[in-house]
Amino acid sequence: MTMCVVPRKGRFLLNISTAIAVASCCIVGGLNAVGVAAALCYPALFVFGDSLSDTGNGNLTGNIFFTRTSSRPYGETVPGYPFDRFSDGLLLVDFLATRIGLPLLNPYLNSSANFSTGVNYAVSGATAQTASSLNSRLLIPLTTLSLDVQIGWHLTLKSTTTPPPNPSNNTSHDNSLYVIEIGGNDYIVALTSFLYSPSYVATNFIPLVIAKIRNATEVLYANGARNLLYIGVTPLGCSPSLLSTFLLGAKDSNGCLTDINTLSYNHGLSLLNLVNQLRLNYTDATFSFLDYYAAYTQVIGNSSSYGFSNTLQACCGAGPLFPYRYNPLLFCNALSTTTLDTLCANPNTFINWDGIHFTHKFNSVIFNLTVNAGSYLNPPNAFSTCMPSM
Ligand SMILES: *[C@@H]1O[C@H](CO)[C@@H](O)[C@H](O)[C@H]1NC(C)=O
Ligand SMILES: *[C@@H]1O[C@H](CO)[C@@H](O)[C@H](O)[C@H]1NC(C)=O
Ligand SMILES: *[C@@H]1O[C@H](CO)[C@@H](O)[C@H](O)[C@H]1NC(C)=O
Ligand SMILES: *[C@@H]1O[C@H](CO)[C@@H](O)[C@H](O)[C@H]1NC(C)=O
Ligand SMILES: *[C@@H]1O[C@H](CO)[C@@H](O)[C@H](O)[C@H]1NC(C)=O
Ligand SMILES: *[C@@H]1O[C@H](CO)[C@@H](O)[C@H](O)[C@H]1NC(C)=O
Ligand SMILES: *[C@@H]1O[C@H](CO)[C@@H](O)[C@H](O)[C@H]1NC(C)=O
Ligand SMILES: *[C@@H]1O[C@H](CO)[C@@H](O)[C@H](O)[C@H]1NC(C)=O
Ligand SMILES: *[C@@H]1O[C@H](CO)[C@@H](O)[C@H](O)[C@H]1NC(C)=O
C-alpha cells in the first residue's frame, strides 16, 4: 500500500490550519466572491435525503452509529474540526447551497437553528420506503426517519417560517429549491440482509423507491414547491462496504460489483423516467436530474485525471490489512491511538472516505462536474442563471 503510509501524529496540527484556510475560502469567501447583487433565484433551499446530504440530523438523533460525525477525523479536511457530516469535508448540498448564494443548511433537528434560508431534513440511514414497509420484508433500516417523515417535518415547519426577501424578489417557499437525494439505503439494507439478490432488488425495490419519490413530489408540489432537483444513487457496487461484503462478486473494468452497479444504474433510469413524467404533468414547475451514477463512472474511469490514486478503498477505517481497507467492526470512528494508524495519508487522493461515504475532494469534483459544468445534469443549464459568476 504505497499510497497509504502510516501518518505521523503531527500532520493533523499542520492540516487543521490549512483546512481552516480552505474552509474560509469555500464557505465565507465563496459567498463574498459572488456578491449579493448577482442573480439569486432561490430564497431558500430544502433538502430531503440520507447521509450523503445530512448536515447534522444524524448526530442529533443520538444514534451511536451517527454521532461519530461529531468526532475527529470527520470534518478533518474542511472545516478542520468535526462538522456533523459523513465526510472529511463538505457534501454536495453544501457546495450547492454556497453556489446559489445561500448559507450552509442547518439540520431540522436543531430546534434553535435559523431556518430562514432553508432546512436540511436529510437523516443518515434514511430510506425512501417507510421503516414499516421495509420491516414487512424483514429489513430493518438504521433509522425510521424515512422520506415520509422528512416531508411531514417540512409541512409542519413551512407553516411557521417565511424566507427573507432577496434581490430577485422571489420571496416565497414556492420559489425555493427542493432537493431529493434518497434510495441508496433502501438497496443497501436489502442487499446486505442476504435475503434478496441484486436482480430481485432491482425488479422489486426500484419501483417502490420511485413511487415514494413520486408521492413526495406530489405532496411538495401541492404545497407550493415549483423547483425540484433529484439526485440519483451512486454506483453502489463501487462502495468499499459492499465490495468487502461480496468479496467474490463479479467485477467490472473499474473493479466495482457488476450486478450491484446494474441495480444502481437502473435506479437512475427509473428516476429520470419519473422526472420526465413529472415535467409533462406539472408544466409550471422545473424538474432537474443529477445523474450521480454517470458522473461517478466518469470520475472513477478517469480517476488519475481528477487527482485520485485510490478509487475503491476507504481512507478512514480498518486500514491496509483489510480488503478495501474496510471492516464494519472497525468503521471510521473517533480518533484514537489505534484508528490514527488506519487513516490514509492524504484523503484528497481517495474517492471514498469511510467505506460508505465520500471525501471532500470527491464531493467537490462531482459538484464541479455536474452543477458547475453542466455535465451529467439534466437539463445541463438547470442552475446556470442562478449561480452568480465565480
Ligand atoms: C452533535 O450532537 C450533540 C448532541 O447529541 C451536540 O452536543 C453536539 O454539539 C453536536 N455536534 C457536534 C459537532 O458536536
Ligand atoms: C444549533 O443552532 C444554534 C444556533 O445557530 C447553534 O448555536 C448550535 O451550535 C447548533 N447546535 C448544533 C448541535 O448544531
Ligand atoms: C435568521 O437569518 C436571517 C438572515 O439569514 C436574519 O434576517 C434573521 O434575523 C435571522 N433570525 C434570527 C431569529 O436570528
Ligand atoms: C405520500 O406522502 C405523504 C407525506 O409524506 C404520506 O403521508 C403518505 O402516506 C404518502 N403516500 C404514499 C402512498 O406513499
Ligand atoms: C423588488 O421589489 C421592490 C418593492 O416592490 C421593488 O422596488 C424592486 O424594484 C424589486 N426588485 C426587483 C429586482 O424586481
Ligand atoms: C423567480 O422564481 C421563478 C420560479 O420559481 C423563476 O422562474 C424566476 O426566474 C425567478 N426570478 C428571478 C428574478 O430569479
Ligand atoms: C399528475 O398531477 C395530478 C395533479 O395535478 C396528480 O393527481 C397525478 O398523480 C400526477 N401524476 C403524476 C404521474 O405525477
Ligand atoms: C473517461 O473520460 C472520457 C472522456 O470524458 C469518457 O468518454 C470515458 O468514458 C471515461 N472513461 C471511463 C472508463 O468512464
Ligand atoms: C472545475 O471544472 C473546471 C472546468 O469546468 C476546471 O477548470 C476546474 O479545474 C475544476 N475545479 C475543480 C476544483 O475540480
Image: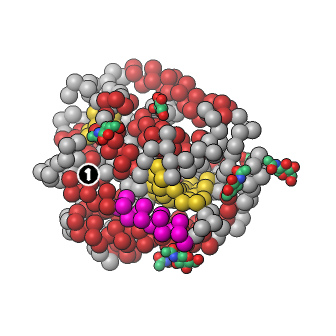
Direction from residue 292 to residue 164 in the image, left or right: right
Identify residue type, mark 1.
Answer: Gly
Q: Is residue 280 above or below residue 316?
A: below
Residue 214 visible to an observer of this rendering: yes
Q: Which residues are magenta?
A: 267-281
Quadrant hosting residue 266: bottom left
Image point (71%, 64%), residue name: 160
Image point (43%, 37%), residue name: 365
- Seen from the viewer's position, the closer of residues 195 and 328 is 195
Direction from residue 98 to residue 159 in the image, left or right: right
- Seen from the viewer's position, the closer of residues 387 and 5 is 387
Residue 177, given in percent of the width and then of the height, sits at 61, 55
Residue 298, given in percent of the width and then of the height, sits at 34, 41
Q: Is mark 1 within 8 Å of ligand 8?
A: no
Judge the density around disc 1: few (<14), some (14-19), many (≥20) Cα neighbours within 10 Å.
Answer: many
Residue 317 visible to an observer of this rendering: no
- The residue to which callout 1 is attached is 237
- Seen from the viewer's position, the closer of residues 101 and 143 is 101
Q: Secondary structure at mark 1?
A: helix
